[in-house]
Image (spheres, coloured by chain):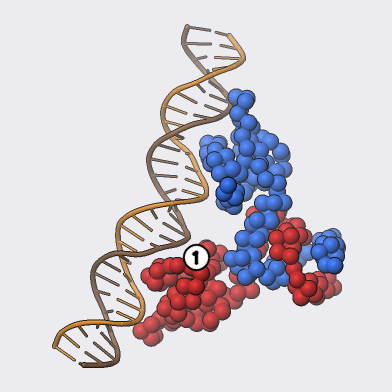
Chain colours: A red, B blue, C orange, D brown
Amino acid sequence: MAPTPLPTDGELAILQVLWDRGPSTVREVHERLGRGRAVGYTTVLKLLQIMNDKGLVRRDASERSHVYEARLPRERTQRALVKDLLQRAFGGSSSALVQRALEAAPADAADLTEIRRLLEEHGT
Amino acid sequence: MAPTPLPTDGELAILQVLWDRGPSTVREVHERLGRGRAVGYTTVLKLLQIMNDKGLVRRDASERSHVYEARLPRERTQRALVKDLLQRAFGGSSSALVQRALEAAPADAADLTEIRRLLEEHGT
DNA sequence: GCCCATGTACGAACGTCTTCGTTGACAGCG
DNA sequence: CGCTGTCAACGAAGACGTTCGTACATGGGC
């Protein structure tokens, strides 16, 4: 079967809500999205229908208000997005990407500690 | 003035060529792009014209064959792309992004050393 | 049984990205 | 001078992504 496609911008915004909240109805997603993004109810509904067709979400239609759930965990989708950017813009060099990330968003002390821990894990 | 917009996929592919080769004609970009990407000559031309309008490239039209040049250095564009992804998919957490990057493309020894060096710089 | 609130479904419109055919300019050559 | 090859410019078409109006279904309260 075809691998799940990368989410578009709007789709990603919706996935964030589903990852934060867990399985949700269109109404719930729409309300949560309301803070920061002005978008109509039917727009969210349409997006979720498309995402369901694409396999990005799963739909439980047993109730009158359908309940949508992200089909892939946040980490896996993030990994796919990073991998895509890595190929398109960095020629696969992860150290270059890490460097740009640190420049773009200065890591605080906690972040630095966390990153060092990750390096230990991956470094062997 | 409006900040330079993020390059699209096709635009980024062209920018990679310009960054690698330096200022180039449409023909040169088209040939270099040929390996790996089958795209018509006029397509590359059109893209470069659009990119010129957007301010992504600069054009020297003094010769019959116009010469195009990336207007921003590779690093700066990469930083903008990473920042965008950081906001859209990671809620700004650079450590999460770094973690996914390491998972997606296992860094080799040289990469690890390089990343540790970057941490030292940013640490303090 | 009717109406209203709440839902889903559908389709159209619009913008952007990408693609390329076609046209016209122009330089060099015979 | 006219042909040929190279080039920029333009316009149009097709694929997506996003938006939302409108239509239709349905369940609960009166």
Q: Residues within 10 Å of mark 1 (few under 14, many from 20)?
A: few
Residue under the point 47% across and 72% down = A34
Q: Position of residue C25 (x, y in %)?
A: 49, 21
Task: Specify whether residue A87 is in view.
Answer: no
Q: Quadrant of residue D26?
A: bottom left
Q: Nearer the viewer, residue A34 or A22?
A: A34
Can you say whether A112 is above or below B2 in the image? below
Q: Nearer the viewer, residue C7 or A33?
A: A33
Q: Position of residue A106 (x, y in %)?
A: 74, 65
Q: Considering the numbered disc 1 on the image, is that residue within a helix, a strand or a loop?
A: helix
Residue under the point 84% across and 62% down = B121
Can you say whether B6 is above or below A18 in the image? above
Residue under the point 62% across and 60% down = B84
| Label 1 sits on residue | A10
Q: Nearer the viewer, residue A37 or A8?
A: A37
Can you say whether D26 is above or below A51 in the image? below
Q: Is residue B26 left or right of residue B118?
A: left
Q: Quadrant of residue A115?
A: bottom right
Q: Position of residue A121 (x, y in %)?
A: 80, 75
Residue furthest out toward the front: B1
The quarter of the rendered structure image containing the C terminus of chain B is bottom right
Task: Specify whether residue B26 is in view.
Answer: yes
Residue under the point 63% across and 37% down = B58
Can you say whether B109 is above or below A66 in the image? above
Parent chain of label 1: A
Q: Is residue D28 left or right of residue D17?
A: left
Q: Position of residue A71 (x, y in %)?
A: 53, 76
Q: Quadrant of residue B114?
A: bottom right
Label 1 sits on what residue type?
Answer: Gly
Q: Is residue B82 left or right of residue A21?
A: right
